[in-house]
Image: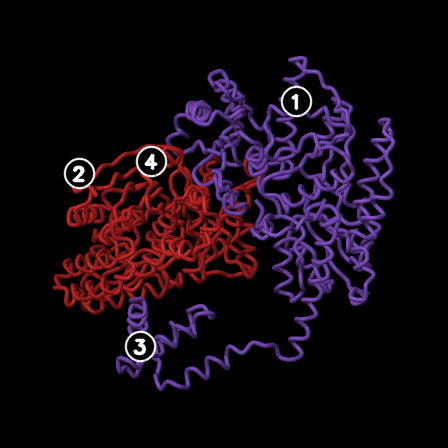
Chain colours: A purple, B red
Amino acid sequence: MKLAYWMYNGPAHIGTLRIASSFKNVHAIMHAPLGDDYFNVMRSMLERKREFTPVTTSIVDRHVLARGSQDKVVNNIIRKDKEDNPDLIILTPTCTSSILQEDLHNFAKRAAIETESADVLLADVNHYRVNEFQAADRTLSQIVKLYLQKAKKENVEFIKTEAPSVNIIGSVDLAFHNNHDMLELKKLFKELNININLILPQDCLVNQLKTLPKAWINIVPYREIGLSTAEWLKEEFDMPYVSTAPMGICEIANFIREIETILNNAGQNVDFADYIDTQTRFISQSAWFSKSIDCQNLTGKRVVVFGDATHAAAMTKILAREMGIKVILAGTYCINEKEWFEAEVKDFCEQIVITNDHNLVGDLIAQSEPSAIFGTQMERHIGKRLNIPCGVISTPVHIQNFPLSYRPFLGYEGANQIADLIYNSFTLGMEDHLLEIFGGHDTREILSAKLSTDMDTQWSKEASAELEKIPGFVRGKVKRNTEKFAKENGISIVTLEVIYSAKEAVGS
Amino acid sequence: MSTEISELKFDCETGNYHTFCPISCVAWLYQKIEDSFFLVIGTKTCGYFLQNALGVMVFAEPRYAMAELEEGDISAQLNDYAELKRLCLKIKRDRNPSVIIWIGTCTTEIIKIDLEGIAPKLELEIGTPIVVARANGLDYAFTQGEDTVLAALAQRLPTAALTPTDVPKLILFGSVPNSTVNQLSLELKKQEIEIAGWLPTAQYNELPTVNPNDYVCGVNPYLSRTATTLLRRRKCKLICAPFPIGPDGTRHWIEKICSVHNKKPVGLEERESAAWKSLEKYTNLIKGKSVFFMGDNLLEISLARFLIKCGMTVDEIGIPYLDKRYQGAELALLEKTCREQKVQLPRIVEKPDNYNQLGRIAKLQPDLVITGMANANPLEARGINTKWSVEFTFSQIHGFTNAADILELVTRPLRRNNALDNLGWTNYNTTQKFT
């Protein structure tokens, strides 16, 4: 057993469900007890989706446990097939139900005989050995394999598109600024005159998957989810892939150059050097911004970076190489990406940490006293406690990762956005500092003191205690209303009862 | 509006429905019992739920944690006793709580960790009381988690040495905020009824004493196991009353408590009518409107009864679990209220099937759907007003004073959508209406 207060990464079934719900017309059946199905809440609330989340829980209760769940699971699959006519139904247990060691493969097989429109697939994931990202990566490649092997059997001809084209693998529900990243990638490829063959899994139909091999290159912007699909496609269909995240001016250039090389090896004659130069020097603002006078204040600043492997590595490089900021510590909670991460950041930081223990990260931050942190929601809170500003650059996912305004992290606009994020983090830090020197502009106490001196009402001990329990931001209002009520009713001492009566009276 | 009166109809769909996990109770109970530490013994799935879906923050000095079961625990390679001892000693050293409450989960049920067997031995060894509650999703829904904790605490209540002059005491059970405790206590004080204690208390060491024949009464409709434990194990007498939710429920609750104390309520009717008077600005808004409960927190029957009294009609009361004995007085009041208001008795659906319910909602087009969070945005996108059921769990809704807060919640979508319409921005296009 592990004493745990907080997690950087969700359980495996969340990863599987993120893939299932990203596809169009795919339904997931979750074999789980009541309460394990909070994925639907997360997706509906965080992404503010208008459609019902295509995940149904086949509930395991005491009764089902006693009888075995085969009939219930199979019936729920068949029922969903009839109700929604999905193309594919994915069956997944959770940590809990996977211990039952039922033959879910057999459940899926049995259900598949009776479904009319849907294929049935059991997500093949070990719920105690892999995390959310690994499960998502694995489920995605499982689905891709299923449909491409099917296409092979049906002797579908895989002919390349006439003009250069790419697949983008890694557009997933409940990811970090993903929708905006995808728009940015689309724009980038349009400007490079490269067609997009397929984006998956978001809004992709499973029967479109057979067209995957038509593309020239697979693009994996985030290595956590999509890399094994790209690797399999390379093995099986000899499709090259690019797994450099186009985040920050330098990496965008590397990303484009990799594509250029692949296209030229395939007999094209493209040269993107001018495009990169124009974008970097004239279109994107971030390179110039880094040189501008504003950024002189960043000289000698020391920061800590922590997040998923993709974002933490990219941010480390941007901070060190593009902004001239000293990264004293770079780390990731993606433990399985250890080797890759170390190789990526070793030249850009003083220390590397690979851990999923947020206490350790907190201690390291406290010890190193950076001037800013770029991390997850957890580091943001650590920063709040230590009074160190923090820019959020990575999941765990949070409602703030679904802004209405355009906030990509990838591409040239992403580079602008990141530069703003970095600069504003520090500016706020300095503002805090100045506020401290001048005593701040918090005048709450003075205000409430003035307002209550107008009244001669006294408060009983219990009533004062009750008032203290009311949250600070409304306490003043409650106090004023109660005293007003007391005055109107000729009451000189506010007791508990007077508070409640006042509340009722104000409500009417 | 139909005036046909029939019997209360109970269905059990045994469908695929959603509620929050019963371990949610940790979120409010650790705040209520201030010297406690809650240890949820479960998997990553449980932990991610508490952190993510419930949005519970553990950033500053948390008084609850997960004992995360790993592969070695599941395959029984590790000794449960030794593992729990290690964690509890650490908790004791770091936080020194007065009580450690173990929250069992689905996983501890399935792998059959003998929590009840381990706790007494470990408690002796480490010198901190350990209370075991099996708040698992195999047996319970959402708010019933509180029931499992209070039922476990009920067994721990001390007994008092009695003198011949002692009369049976009154103990109330149900976790409500301290100000609600004060309000309900005041109401009973007006009737010259003293509450001897509440379960739970802010301090574990201040749990009330109970003796056989003491009176106990619940304030929350989801506490049937706690009631049973007090009744059977502690030989208390249960006052089965409607719950003190809404002025009508509160009045009946006080009346019932008065009646067992052989007291005639004083000024209670005036108190109730004054409360209704202060609610008029809300009741005028909802009179004649319909509401559909998808079912989530087991507050559904009480809320439906109150809203019917306010003049609403209820299409369906979905509820995850209904104990017809513990909720007996509440069900009787629901029936009586419907007859008084001359409205159709609502259909009560236990363990509803959410998919079927969405079909019924599409057909009935209720004015308001009270639902879990997963379905709220999609229903809003289909032009159906919704209110999150969890808001009623996390708001103060008991007693005369807080009835306004219930209606504040219920009327908010109606008021807001009316306000948005009146602002005129939905007429940005002359042919299309924004929904």
How many other residues sit within 10 Å of disc 2, few (<14), some (14-19) or many (≥20)? few
Task: Find numbered disc 1 in the image and state the secondary structure of the residue it sits on.
Answer: helix
Task: Find numbered disc 2 in the image and state the secondary structure of the residue it sits on.
Answer: loop
Residue A171 x/y as whole percent: 64, 38
Q: Which residue is mark 3?
A: A485
**Farthest residue toward the front?**
B430
Mark 3–mark 1 Cα distance, whole angstroms, equals 73 Å
The answer to whether residue A38 shows anywhere in this view is yes
Using the image, name the chain to which the residue with label 3 belongs.
A
On whether disc 1 and disc 2 are found on a single subunit, the reply is no
Q: Which residue is mark 4?
A: B363
Residue B395 x/y as whole percent: 38, 58
Q: Nearer the viewer, mark 3 or mark 1?
A: 1
Using the image, name the chain to which the residue with label 4 belongs.
B
Q: Nearer the viewer, mark 4 or mark 3?
A: 4
Task: Find numbered disc 4 in the image and state the secondary structure of the residue it sits on.
Answer: helix
The residue under label 3 is which amino acid type?
Phe
Disc sitting over residue A210 in the figure? 1
